[in-house]
Amino acid sequence: MSGSFYSKFIFPYLCELTMSGKSLSTFRLDTLQETSGQVLEIGFGTGLNLPHYPDSVYEIDAVDVNPQMHHLAQKRIANSKIIVTNYVLSGEQLPMDDASYDYVTCTFTLCSIPDVKQALSEINRVLKPGGVFVFLEHGLSDVKSVQTWQHRLNPLQKRIGDGCHLNRKIDDLVQDSSFVLTSLNRFQLPSVPRFLGHCYQGIATKSQSKV
């Protein structure tokens, strides 16, 4: 649905409404607490992470493929002390130089990037050696019966969620992209259907051998 009326003018408001709950804010805060300095955020969306970055973060390069998302984020950007530079582009092709960032963050975004492996490769490329990738994503459950429904409902979810997949196994995708997974917490979001709310919260480091 990329480029469609729904994608441009309806989904950004739907995303703002459904992703701004109090429980999600708690998880965002916990996920982002160890970041600092200049950060690259993939899937900046409407800026829901912005109030939850610690004071040690002074600048964010914000990437999102949907220009309407950035429009909705303007109030949060204006109220933040963090300098935000917006890039309207896909995470699959980043213009940033190799080894540019100490931290890259990504929340509820890897589910919807068409070529997620390419995006993770790009994240790895722009991180400095030993740099840190911080993520909070929903994906494939560890319960077989829930997985069955995730696979069944995935085609419908991709339409409603503007490309969102229910059944990506996030930890495997990260580790298959030359990251070392140093922390992983899998949990179910409260008051969210099990097929939609299984989450992966993790920290991964770029291998020191990568340049």
Image: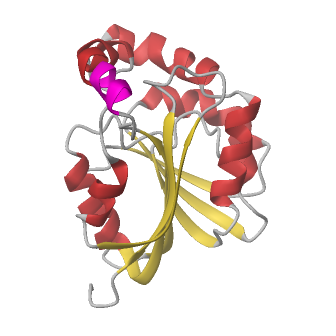
Q: Give residue 81's position: percent from left, percent from top.
A: 78, 56
State the residue in front, 192 or 116: 192
- Vertical order, 122 against 89 (above or below): below
Total numbered badges shown on the rendered structure: 0
Tell me, what colour scheme is on the image?
secondary structure
Give the residue drawn at x 43%, y 24%: 195
Q: Picture quarter containing residue 35? A: bottom right
Q: Give residue 151's position: percent from left, percent from top.
A: 25, 24
Can see residue 96? no
Query: Which residue ends up furthest to the bottom in the rendered image?
Result: 209
In the image: residue 18, left or right of residue 2: right
- Vertical order, 119 against 142 (above or below): below
Per the rendered image, the range of residues in magenta is 144-150
- Vertical order, 76 against 52 (above or below): above
Q: Picture quarter containing residue 64? A: top left
Residue 148: in magenta span: yes
Q: Give residue 200's position: percent from left, percent from top.
A: 48, 48
Please name the predominant secondary structure of the magenta segment in the image: helix
State the residue in front, 87 or 54: 54
Give the residue drawn at x 63%, y 64%: 59
Give the residue drawn at x 28%, y 23%: 148
Can see residue 50? yes
- Vertical order, 88 against 180 (above or below): above
In the image: residue 73, left or right of residue 7: right
Residue 42: in magenta span: no
Give the quarter of the figure containing the C terminus. Answer: bottom left
Give the residue drawn at x 58%, y 33%: 46
Give the quarter of the figure containing the N terminus. Answer: top left
In the image: residue 46, left or right of residue 51: left
Q: Give residue 204's position: percent from left, percent from top.
A: 44, 69
